[in-house]
Amino acid sequence: HSKASNKLKSAAEHLRYVFYKYDMNDKDIVALSGAHTVGRAFKDRSDTVEEGYLGGTAYTKRGVSNLQKSKTAGGRSWTKNWLKFDNSYFGEVMKAFEGTKDPDVVCFPTDKCLIADKAFRRYCEDFAASEAAFHKAYAEAHKKLSELGCK
């Protein structure tokens, strides 16, 4: 195994470790990962990307139409239209795995493992092909997660 494939295997193991203890299955994990279709990562918060609040990409910097009415610019998004809850995240993950990633979006090992891992892959491909299937699975997984409550 290469270092990159070991990193993706460990990312899949990490997601399972986090979610299986809450009675989530692989479909739930992939669906919940799709929440990354909205939002951004910031250097100031996670130090995983170079863009902070004062920077940004073609999709997140001050003045671009993708900001819509958001008052907060910057960061690096997982998708081009990061304020729209759709299935585009899964297409971006597939492109990143194939090496054709949009340079203005982020894709972490915990995203890429959704294609690298055989069990996750079928759901990632299904959700990339059908926004309705993604929305249905996300609603079910989100409901399951929210019903756990908090302590």
Image: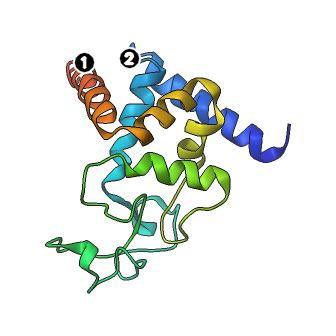
Numbered disc 2: secondary structure = loop
Which quadrant of the view contains residue 40? bottom left
Q: Amino acid at mark 1?
A: Leu
The residue drawn where x is 41% and y is 36% is: 127
Residue 22 circle label:
2
User: Dot 2, crowdedness within 10 Å: few (<14), some or many (≥20)?
Assistant: few
Locate the N terminus and report the quarter of the image it occupies: top right
**Given contact means CB atoms under 8 Å apart, are the residues at marks 2 and 1 in contact?**
yes
Q: Which residue is mark 1?
A: 148
- Picture residue at 44% right of the left edge, 15% below the top: 21
The picture places residue 55, in percent across and down from the top left corner, at 40, 81
Q: In the picture shown, does residue 87 fall above or below 29?
A: below
Residue found at x 53% / y 23%: 17
Outermost residue toward the front? Answer: 129
Q: Position of residue 96 (x, y in %)?
A: 59, 55
Disc on the earlier residue, 2 or 1: 2
